[in-house]
Image (tube, rainbow, N blue to C red):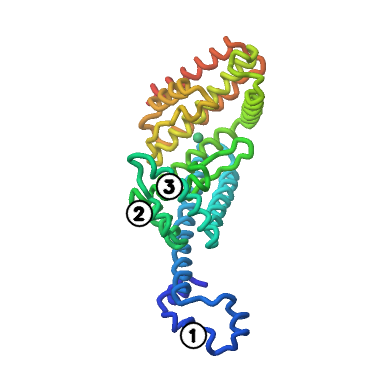
Amino acid sequence: MSFEQLNKEIKATPEDLGLENSSNDLEPKEADILSGEELTPEEAREIMETSEKEIELLDILEKWTAESIAEMKQRAKHFEIDESIVNEIKDDIKQSLERDFYRIITEEDVEELKKSSLNIASKLAEKKDELDVRSLIEKISQKDIIDLLNRKLTKEISTEEERVLDIFSYVNEGGTLGTYDRRSGKIDISLFNSKNLKEYMGTLMHEFTHKALSEMVPEITKKETSFSIIKRLRQATGEIKGRKDMTDKERTQDLFFQNLIAINESLAYLAGKYYGSEKEPPYNSYLDKTHPGLFKRIYDQINVATDGRSLTDFDHFAARLYSSFANSWKEDMSQEDLKEIVISTMKEINKFKNES
Ligand SMILES: [Zn+2]
């Protein structure tokens, strides 16, 4: 159905559409076969209005995707990586949006989402100074949810509505805005949060930066992911409780990877600045990946050095800095070696700062 046709049907009265007395002209049996379940005029109207809003939402997201693809192609050039990376991300975006749409496709899905969300809203409502959004969730329909997603992307929404979306996002994706899986190379962005189109772009560009950096040095990325998996397994089994239980070699490698992750994450956060996201990283939530103090030092230093520079300059610098750090990896590096690598990285950051 074309958009014009749909519009026309929405403006039509139920009688115009033959919905008012749909079964009267027919034998009951035949009517059942033809229409399945009989719709009331209100239900028919609701369905049409919902599809209109759905088309609107898809339209917004399609335009946004086209814009983001153009932006990523530009940045892929800065990183001197193959443009095919952008097509992979395009598929990833499509998949994550489809998954989010599937979460509200039937009435049962919506009821399920509302049930889990009410649970969380009740717990929040018990707390002091917390918004109580239970009544808002109770009366929300599929159409309202789609409308809310439309409005949050393009217009202002109320604080209560923001809270509802944050709860939905928590129920659906644990509240994450986006992720980049270093093992599969997949980017996932979530529609169910209170972020608008601009912030959505910031999230995507953060994840794009991770992917671009990681895929520039695939061997080191592989080493780092397997190292961190093994480390976590050994921690889970109690084999290592802290860094003191590691060998000297493991400790040095661990510190190398902590630096690597801190640089990678800092660059992803700083790339977000070019898309209006001024947020400083929540250092402590990366505790299992990198030391918060180390992360903050690296972030601050790169932040000062890149402040006010163009995105092109930033990307070129990011690519250079990250690959030179990653490629200085040596299987049997000593603590002294690592110290030198870190010092030369600091020098590289300072050199960029003084260039401007
Ligand atoms: Zn990140």
Count residues near mark 1 (Cα–Cα under 10 Å), then give few for <14, some for 14-19, many for 20+.
few
| Residue 97: percent from left, percent from top | 53, 52
- State the residue position of label 1: 21
| Nearest-to-viewer mark from 1 and 2 | 1
- Secondary structure beneath label 3: helix
Mark pair 2, 3: CA separation: 24 Å
Amino acid type at image mark 3:
Ala
Identity of the residue drawn at 59% across and 42% down: 186
Which numbered tag is attached to residue 237? Answer: none
Respond yes or no on whether mark 1 lies under 8 Å from ligand 1: no
Mark number for residue 121? 3
Q: CA distance from mark 1 to mark 2?
A: 39 Å
Q: Is mark 2 within 8 Å of ligand 1?
A: no
Q: Is residue 257 above or below residue 73?
A: above
User: Which residue occupies the foreground of this view, 277 or 329?
Assistant: 277
Image spot of residue 83 (x, y percent)? 57, 44
Please name the amino acid that badge 2 sits on.
Lys
Disc 3 crowd rating (10 Å Cα; few below 14, some 14-19, many 20+) is many
Pick the residue in front: 343 or 335.
Answer: 335
Observer-side mark, 1 or 3, equals 3
Name the secondary structure under disc 1: loop
Rendered view: 12 above or below 60: below
Dot 1 or dot 2, earlier in sequence? 1
| Label 3 CB sits under 8 Å from any ligand 1 atom | no
Mark 2 element type: loop
- In the displayed structure image, the side of residue 119 where residue 229 appears, left or right: right
Residue 223 visible, this angle: no
Q: Amino acid at mark 1?
A: Asn
What numbered label is drawn on residue 155?
2
